[in-house]
Image (tube, coloured by chain):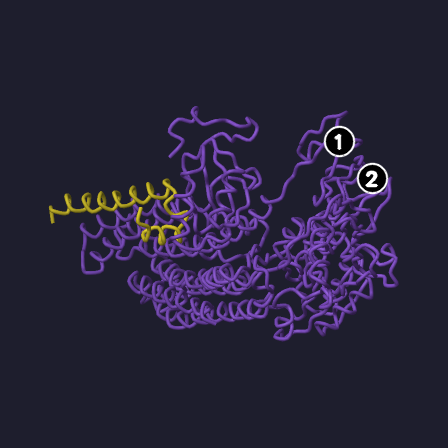
């Protein structure tokens, strides 16, 4: 069970990385235009 | 790119250069990826543009750099897009901060829920003693701060309701979250078996998602409605000595002299200084014909100048104008709407006391039978958690979100939170006539020669009179003749010289003819009349045929045009109704327990719009009418009106069905909880299963 001392902090850390990444996308206005983002992937330039 | 060096840009006129804060344009016809590419590429060629970005969801273009708005607009028109510059002040450029905060709370709750759920799985699969206590402690360390942060919207709403001694859905939700976390903390510290941290967190997470979706669809409708306001200009031309300066309407004082250009709206109340003027009062009174006024006549804010440029001396500004007085009438009429109890709150008023009483009885019962306070308390709390406030909390928002976004794509902006529910209850539709159901229509006689048509077009083009606008539309295929010296004779018509002949377009009497309506006279030939009538708005006839509830027209227009128009549509009409009489009419109807849907656009309709059980205004309506109404109709056609009513009825039906589903789950879950057999695992299963069923059921509103 000693492995938990490592595994629990690691799993929490990975979750936190995901959370921080999400907060970054929100602050970057990446959810302001969902239809536009869906359409832009079809643009060539 | 031309903006690598802004200083290199030739600067034509300092006043028109906009600093790099950004310009916004509403471009309603953007609809696909190709449009985005075309516009953004095109903008690179415009002098002074440093960045250009299209927002497809809002159908808006944002441009930064030192560009001239006129050039950008011209470029957009070249590219084939209709564009309207937006007033950034009115648009309130501050980003959607509420939505962003909600999204952050969702993310934090989601993160916490995933981690705690993982720890809970370990506990459920048989962790015991010290390991279990450790897992519970870590869960508590994650859950407590997260609940304190993420669940704030529920706590705030619940507190706001409790303070005025009312119950809403957030009260049982807040209580369930707080009790789940509180009891789990107690159990954890005592080294107990069951902790409900995952239930408390998933409740927060699911409900926040519902709340965010709800906010998002409504803010999309709101920002589109705000955009309409931003299209209106709140400036006036003040004349001081020989100078004319543009000032904000709010800066005008009593006694100022202002000039009102042709086609513009009179911004304040005042006395006419010019000799005469032609004004369109249809927004204020519903009259379809333009009126002639003489010097010293009283003009009111909201009237439209359709004649030559006029000058007036201000007699009332700001709060004192008749426009504002009308707005105050609206505020008093709106009270009835604010006291409307939403379906979710009605459900909460039944559900909350029942469940709380049940939990209390469970506590008493277990106390009497076992005498174990801790166990009795844990049973009572598990009853509260397992009764699924989650599915109940989602029952209404899930349906209304789906319905509002469907209506949004049909061109109907739902502005008010309870608008759909009230719309579903309506039993009668009352329409305004001028501008709402009708459009001026003039038919050109078949026998009229091509030359005459060309002359009429030339004369009509030079005037802003509603009849001229209608003539222009009727003659859209004709090329205008070159007519010289066109002058507008106020109250009579237009005069000009064509191939040496005097040509006149105007009232029959002025032309020297024996008819009274609008006509044209070329040289010494006999005058020819036009047939004038009012045409129904696109889709109005079909919509009225399909409506299953009675409808009628109430208008401020005169008896004759009103009757003629009503015959066209085949519904009853009442003419010569003033603004306050409209309000009284609606109140009479509601006294006879008729729930009225009011559809109108003018200032004379605003009070009625606010007082009606539900209300709609077309996008062309006055700002005041739009803000008084629940729903703004962006599309030009009324054909979808019956479908909108149908969707509103369906969404009420589905919301009730969702409550039924939640109740059904409770029928199974409550006995288990009362028997003291509920475990955190059972609570998690019941919550997820019922929430997902409710969410899926709600999507049916999209396919009706």
Q: Can you name the residue that lies furthest to the left here?
A: A2
Q: Do labels 1 and 2 share a chain?
A: yes
Which disc is residue B57 wearing? none
Residue B200 coordinates in the image, percent (x, y): 36, 54
User: Answer yes or no: do the residues labelled 1 and 2 have beta carbons within 8 Å?
Assistant: no
In the rendered image, the residue lying farthest to the front is B500
Please rate how many residues cluster around mark 1, counting C-alpha atoms within 10 Å: few if below 14, some from 14 to 19, many from 20: some
Q: Picture coordinates of residue B224 (x, y %)? A: 53, 50
- Vertical relation: B52 (above or below) B113: above
Indicate the colour of chain A.
yellow
Occupied quadrant, residue B385: bottom left
* Figure quadrant of residue B384: bottom left
**Residue drawn 46% across and 52% down?**
B30
Disc marking residue B253? 1
Tell which circle, 1 or 2, labels the residue nearer the N-terminal end.
1
Residue B466 coordinates in the image, percent (x, y): 73, 54
Gap in Å between the C-alphas at discs 1 and 2? 16 Å
Q: In this view, does B16 lie to the left or right of B216?
A: right
- Choose between B188 and B205: the one closer to the eye: B205
Identify the residue position indicated by label 2 in the image: B272
Front disc: 1 or 2: 2
Depth check, front residue: B639 or A2: B639
* Residue shown at the point (66%, 36%) measured from the top left: B235
Question: Is residue B493 visible to the viewer in this orientation of the structure?
Answer: yes
> Which chain is mark 1 on?
B
Considering depth in this image, is B483 or B474 the residue closer to the camera? B483
| Relative to B3, residue B40 above or below | below
Circle 2: is it few (<14), some (14-19), or many (20+) Cα within 10 Å?
many
Q: In this view, does B64 lie to the left or right of B636?
A: left
Colour in which chain B is shown?
Answer: purple
The residue positioned 68% from the left and 54% from the top of the image is: B335
Q: Where is residue B589 in the image (x, y as percent from the top left)?
A: 74, 67
């Amino acid at each position: 069970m000693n492995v938990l001392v490592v595994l629990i902090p690691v799993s929490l850390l990975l979750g936190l990385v995901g959370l921080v990444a999400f907060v970054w996308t929100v602050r970057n206005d990446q959810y302001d235009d969902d239809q536009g983002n869906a359409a832009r992937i079809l643009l060539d330039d | 790119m031309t903006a690598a060096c802004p200083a290199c840009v030739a600067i034509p006129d300092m006043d028109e250069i906009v600093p790099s804060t950004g310009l916004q344009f509403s471009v309603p016809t953007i609809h696909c990826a190709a449009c985005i590419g075309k516009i953004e590429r095109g903008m690179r060629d415009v002098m002074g543009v440093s960045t250009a970005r299209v927002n497809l969801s809002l159908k808006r273009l944002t441009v930064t750099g030192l560009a001239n708005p006129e050039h950008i607009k011209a470029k957009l028109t070249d590219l084939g897009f209709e564009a309207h510059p937006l007033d950034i002040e009115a648009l309130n450029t501050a980003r959607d901060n509420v939505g962003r905060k909600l999204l952050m709370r969702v993310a934090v709750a989601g993160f916490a829920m995933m981690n705690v759920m993982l720890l809970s799985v370990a506990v459920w699969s048989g962790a015991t003693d010290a390991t279990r206590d450790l897992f519970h402690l870590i869960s508590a360390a994650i859950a407590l701060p997260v609940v304190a942060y993420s669940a704030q919207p529920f706590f705030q709403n619940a507190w706001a309701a409790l303070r005025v001694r009312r119950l809403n859905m957030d009260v049982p939700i807040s209580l369930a979250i707080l009790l789940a976390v509180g009891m789990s903390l107690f159990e954890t510290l005592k080294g107990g078996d069951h902790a409900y941290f995952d239930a408390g967190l998933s409740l927060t997470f699911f409900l926040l998602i519902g709340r965010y979706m709800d906010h998002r669809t409504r803010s999309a409708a709101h920002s589109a409605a705000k955009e309409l306001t931003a299209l209106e200009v709140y400036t006036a031309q003040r004349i001081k000595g020989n100078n004319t300066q543009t000032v904000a309407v709010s800066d005008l004082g009593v006694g100022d002299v202002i000039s009102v250009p042709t086609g513009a709206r009179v911004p304040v109340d005042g006395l006419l200084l010019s000799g005469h003027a032609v004004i369109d009062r249809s927004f204020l009174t519903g009259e379809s014909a333009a009126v002639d006024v003489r010097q010293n006549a009283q003009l009111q804010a909201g009237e439209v100048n359709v004649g030559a440029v006029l000058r007036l001396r201000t007699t009332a500004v700001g709060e004192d104008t008749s426009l504002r007085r009308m707005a105050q009438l609206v505020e008093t009429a709106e009270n009835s709407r604010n006291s409307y109890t939403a379906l979710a709150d009605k459900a909460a008023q039944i559900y909350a006391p029942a469940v709380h009483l049940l939990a209390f009885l469970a506590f008493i019962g277990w106390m009497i039978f076992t005498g174990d306070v801790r166990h009795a308390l844990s049973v009572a709390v598990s009853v509260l958690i397992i009764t699924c406030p989650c599915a109940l909390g989602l029952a209404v928002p899930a349906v209304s979100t789906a319905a509002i976004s469907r209506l949004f794509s049909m061109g109907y902006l739902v502005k008010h939170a309870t608008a759909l529910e009230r719309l579903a209850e309506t039993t009668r539709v009352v329409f305004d006539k001028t501008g709402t159901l009708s459009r001026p229509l003039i038919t050109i006689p078949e026998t009229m020669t091509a030359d005459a048509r060309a002359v009429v077009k030339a004369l009509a083009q030079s005037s802003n009179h509603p009849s001229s606008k209608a003539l222009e539309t009727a003659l859209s295929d004709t090329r205008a003749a070159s007519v010289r010296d066109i002058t507008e004779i106020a109250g009579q018509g237009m005069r000009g010289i064509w191939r040496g002949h005097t040509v006149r377009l105007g009232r029959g009497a002025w032309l020297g003819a024996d008819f009274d309506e609008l006509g044209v006279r070329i040289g010494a030939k006999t005058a020819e009349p036009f047939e004038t009538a009012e045409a129904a708005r696109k889709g109005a006839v079909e919509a009225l045929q399909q409506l299953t509830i009675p409808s009628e027209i109430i208008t401020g227009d005169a008896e004759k045009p009103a009757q003629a128009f009503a015959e066209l549509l085949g519904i009853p009409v009442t003419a010569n109704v003033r603004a306050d009489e409209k309000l009284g009419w609606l109140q009479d109807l509601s006294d006879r327990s008729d729930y009225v849907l009011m559809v109108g656009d003018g200032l004379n309709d605003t009070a009625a719009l606010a007082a009606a059980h539900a209300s709609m205004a077309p996008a062309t309506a006055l700002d005041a009418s739009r803000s008084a109404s629940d729903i703004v109709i962006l599309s030009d056609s009324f054909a979808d009106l019956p479908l909108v009513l149908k969707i509103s009825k369906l969404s009420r039906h589905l919301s009730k069905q969702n409550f039924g589903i939640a109740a059904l789950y409770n029928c199974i879950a409550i006995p288990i909880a009362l028997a003291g057999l509920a475990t955190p695992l059972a609570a998690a299963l019941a919550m997820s299963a019922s929430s997902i069923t409710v969410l899926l059921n709600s999507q049916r509103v999209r396919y009706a």
